[in-house]
Image: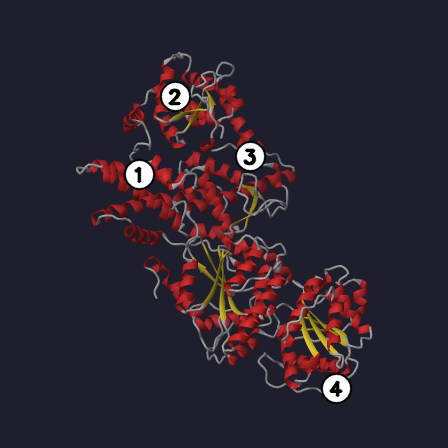
Amino acid sequence: MSLRRQPSRATSKPIIPSSSSIFINPTIDLFLQQFSQFIRRHITENKSETVLVAGPPSCGKTKLLEHIFTKLHTDDPTLHDHVILFRLNGLIHSIESYAVQEISSQYNIHTKLNHDYQCDNVQILLETIANEKQDKKFYFIFILDHFEHFTYQKLNSILYTLFDAVYSDKKSYSILTIAVSNRSDCLELPEKRLKSRFSQIYYILSSPSIDEYTKYILQTYKIKKDIQISNDLFNSLTNIEQKIFAYVRDTNININEDTRPDQYLDGCLTHLEILLLLMTNHVIKRMDEKLQNQITGANDSGDDDDDNDNDEKTSGILTDTKFTFDQVYHEYSKYVMKNHKYFYDKAVVRKTFLRLIERGFIRRYYGRYAPVDEPLSGEHTMIMTINNDELKQYVELKPLPAEIKRYAKSNTNI
Amino acid sequence: MSLPDSYSCRSSISTCLEKLFSSNPLIPYPSHVYIYGNNNTGKSTLVKHVLNVHKHSILWFDCREIYSLNMFYSTFISSLTNQSVPTMRNFNDFVRVLRDYSIQENNLKKKKTKQYYFVVLHHIELLLNYDTTGHLLYLLFKLNELTLGNFHHSLVLIGHQPFYLLPQMNQIEAELGVLTPTTIFIPAYTRTEIIAILQNILTQQQDILPSSISQLQIIIELALQIFYAVTNDLVELKDMSTMCIKDYLRINAKKQANDDGMNNDYRMLYQKEFFMQVLNSVYTRSMSIPKFLDTHTADEETIENASPISIMNNKTNTRDLPLSAKFLLIAIYLATQNAIKYDRMLYDKQSQGKKSRRAKIMHKRTQLDTAKIEYLPLSSNKPVALNRLLAIYCSLQGDTIPLTSQIYSQLALLTSMRLIELVGGSNESGIINLNEPKYRCISSSDYIRRLASSIDFKIDNLLLV
């Protein structure tokens, strides 16, 4: 875990942390000490400040902050009267009116009263709250989750209000703004004026090791089993915790199952569906070859039937070839006329195709103004989401009818 | 409480879910679970059963009944409280209202253990389609955090696709982080399992004699030979099999007692064609089950509301229709399927040779495909003028057979048999306008094709669609 910060303006005695319900290793302990010290100093001196806490998703940023503030209130209950914590989320509170509603709601929870503040902006709201108790100076702590989403708003008055407090001399309140983000470059995102108002104090956290965290979970929940979790690319602390709980509840669960399992083909597809997938594969392959020939300038020696491979569908990225249902149906018609097998009406084939789309084997593109439930027509473009290798493995291993295997081999798809 | 017998093949998955959702004082519930698989594989039934076994508080939302996010928010809150639901215009309002309700409930109850909910979102892909920001799924995962820890719940999502293929997952993973719920895949039923389930369901539902059960099982297996290659959806297979059995029972009821084995074999063989008709009409929802049963049968029963002549004529099969009547039916079918501007190309033999005519037909077919013209299905066909019908008929029959008044009597015969219909001709006084008579074909496409094949007429050569 790495930790970087600018030198602080003053130092004070380190606070020894007591036993807590969060995972603590030496690095986290150091962060807790320094950050707690930082906050206490600012509360004591009534100083407004801005600070960034960044780190990868699910590394424990929010939990650590919650722990710090809970401990703060536990150690000094008198803080509850004048230190108020507000938590805003950039995904839903980046617009000022929403932020105002949320702040007043959280204030009502804090005071257990039911005020109805009709304020237009954050500054007026904070002043209204602060003016309620004129004998005390309030200390507002704002935790801005997903801080980058606040910066996406132009002329964001929430950020202006919070950041301006550092430089303006407010007599009734002070503000500590803690920006929390997954992006370590989020300080580059705000506008120039906001950037200049942000102090360059930042803490960058990283996840503890999987083994350490696994041991901690087993100890906390008194699980006597020895569980080893492999290093998956998508393993986060939340994921590790959930895997352990699921395994403890049901030992038949594969604890090291891939986070991205391959599409389940087994126990999923009917013969007609497999055939349609193979035909789609063949159509895509032919379109790619035709495009490649056009690029390299080779002669196109396809017969009349290949004219149905429409020109507009070959445009786009080479590896992301789009096709239409009509093209696949044309391939299907040729197969049926040749082999006299699997002959069904077009409507049956269309419905089977829709099932493949529903299950995610094929993804459909919608027009900009098209409704989501627009019925599939011959012109709608789609791409395949399963790759050749999966299909190849499945067709080779599974006992399928001979004509399907013959089709797969004869078209040299696989 | 045990699973119904029809879910006996799901016992292992049910056990897994029961262990996952069982209450444990030491281990928390899984916070997010995603269950996925094909349609009608028992996902929601298993989840409901398991949650009910443990007597959990369930908030069940079927996203097929939700048409907007605002509707979802208000449905969610109204499922928690009997009081009037405030207006919620966005997720921010929803979170505030939910948080306020949870705090109110916790304060009222004052229990040590707080109320724990299992929020189940069935058909989650449909709800995510309404999300324009792309953050809804992420926010649902963070609901506990957003409500400041006051709303204790586990989120159970039920869908069809793998989790990482859900709508907007790419955006979420790129911006916000990877979401990794506990995923459980429920495979489709195998053919053996479907046969067992259908036999179990249908023997309970149908009022049949025990002696007919073996016949029932044979029909189910025969039907699945055709249907299972196309779909493994249990509900679709059940509907189609039920219909086949209803038809079989109806035939059985009308048959004489001395039914020899020859007829049985014939019926079994003939059923295959019947099964294909079922697949092409009921499976595709182009015809309802009652309508299909009225108009189709494995033994070609009479059409409902038919006249005595038509009953007599329909009792005999298609081979007994006069040749000219068959050609008339084919002509009217072709006139309905092909646009009028292609008639010259298709039927005018004098201006073109046979070879070039076929080539032109193939060329026109490809042109139509590229021009993306869509033809209406037979059920919404337009009436055909008599002149056009007779012109096409003459083209099909050739020059050797003259057009006589006998043709008009054939038309009347077909109308009384309700194979074609005279439309739009009569005015208010009931007098038919003979200047512009029009006919519409009300026979099914399958019937016409069978008719054409019985006289070795290649109808596909003249169909542009």
Residue A377, image x and y in percent? Answer: 54, 40
Q: Is residue A79 left or right of residue B380?
A: right
Amino acid found under the numbered disc labelled 1:
Gln
Instruction: State the mark number for residue B271.
Output: 1
Tell which residue pokes out farthest to the front in this image. B429
Give whichever of A14, B315 is nearer the camera: B315
Q: CA distance from mark 2 to mark 1?
A: 27 Å
Instruction: State the mark number for residue A94.
Output: none
Q: Chain of mark 3?
A: A
The residue depicted at 61 percent of the width and 68 percent of the height is B146
On the same chain, marks 2 and 1? The answer is yes
Q: Are marks 2 and 4 in contact (CB under 8 Å)?
A: no
Give whichever of B270, B423 is nearer the camera: B423
Q: Are marks 3 and 2 in contact (CB under 8 Å)?
A: no
| Residue at numbered disc 4 | A12
| Residue at numbered disc 3 | A308
Q: Nearer the viewer, mark 3 or mark 2?
A: 2
